[in-house]
Structure formats: structure tokens, C-alpha cells
């Protein structure tokens, strides 16, 4: 949800958090905050600790993937020395600023 909408509809964000639904707040299309429910201890925000593999993991959307960190580490390690697919050429017109 964009920041402007979050300001205007803050009470809805709080209602959603009370019902266990986190909301990602965006600034210029980039995630900058999460309004999330609080754990049963009343102090710890759920999802307050960023997940090492990004937003989806941080929201618990990949919770069923028990070996995700190991699998991603293996993928990254195997891609380190792969030459079948060269990296992007950032000097090409495709990457020129508009």
C-alpha cells in the first residue's frame, strides 16, 4: 500500500493487523515498512526481524519451504562458476536511463 493510502487509511491497517494480516507500506514503489500484528507477548511485532531471503519470506509466505536457505545457498554457489549464461551488459542501450 502506498504511503499516502496508508496515511489516509491507517485505522484500516490497524484493523488488519488485529486480524493477523500484515500490510507492506511502499514509498515510490519500494517496500519501506510493514504494519504487522503483535505476538501474544504484546511486545514483539510479528515479522519484525527481516528474513534473509526477502519480503516473501519475511511475511511467512514461504514458511512451508523448510530447506529454503540451504536450497538458495546451493543455487547461488552453483551459479558462481556457470559460464553458459553471461551476465547482463549494462553498457547496452537496453539499460540506458530514460
Image (tube, rainbow, N blue to C red):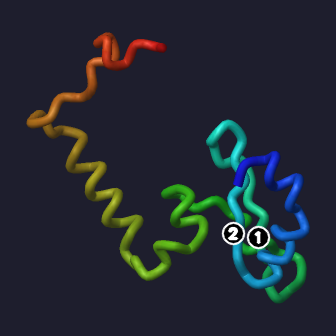
Quarter of the image for residue 64 reads: bottom left
Q: Which element carries disc 1, helix, strand or loop? A: loop
**Mark closest to the chain's N terminus, 1 or 2:** 1
CA gap, disc 1 and disc 2: 7 Å
Q: Is residue 80 left or right of residue 49?
A: left
Pointer 1 and pointer 2: residues touching (CB < 8 Å)? Answer: yes
Residue at 70% over, 55% down: 1
Q: Where is residue 62 in the image (x, y as percent from the top left)?
A: 46, 73
Q: Position of residue 70 (x, y in %)?
A: 35, 66
Q: Where is residue 79 in the image (x, y as percent from the top left)?
A: 22, 45
The one of 23 and 58 positioned closer to us in this rendering: 23
Vertical position of residue 48 compared to residue 16: above or below: above
Mark 1 crowdedness (10 Å alpha carbons): few <14, some 14-19, many ≥20 = many
Q: Is residue 34 left or right of residue 78?
A: right
Mark 2 crowdedness (10 Å alpha carbons): few <14, some 14-19, many ≥20 = some
Residue at 40% over, 13% down: 96
For label 1, the residue is: 36
The one of 53 and 11 positioned closer to us in this rendering: 11
Residue at 53% over, 57% down: 52
Considering every residue shown, the one lying at the far bottom of the view is: 40
Residue at 52% over, 63% down: 56
Vertical position of residue 91 compared to residue 44: above or below: above
Q: Position of residue 11 (x, y in %)?
A: 90, 68
Q: Is residue 41 left or right of residue 75?
A: right
For label 2, the residue is: 47
Vertical position of residue 50 compared to residue 87: above or below: below
Q: Which element carries disc 2, helix, strand or loop? A: loop
| Nearest to viewer (mark 1 / mark 2) | 1
Q: Is residue 77 left or right of residue 37?
A: left
Amino acid at each position: 500500500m502506498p504511503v499516502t493510502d496508508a496515511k489516509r487509511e491507517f485505522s484500516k491497517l490497524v484493523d488488519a493487523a488485529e486480524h493477523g494480516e500484515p500490510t507492506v507500506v511502499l514509498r515510490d514503489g519500494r517496500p519501506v515498512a510493514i504494519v504487522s500484528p503483535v505476538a501474544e507477548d504484546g511486545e514483539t511485532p510479528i515479522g519484525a526481524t527481516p528474513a534473509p531471503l526477502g519480503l516473501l519470506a519475511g511475511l511467512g509466505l514461504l514458511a512451508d519451504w523448510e530447506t529454503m536457505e540451504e536450497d538458495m545457498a546451493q543455487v547461488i554457489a552453483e551459479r558462481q562458476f556457470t559460464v553458459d549464461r553471461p551476465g547482463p551488459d549494462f553498457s547496452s542501450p537496453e539499460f540506458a536511463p530514460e
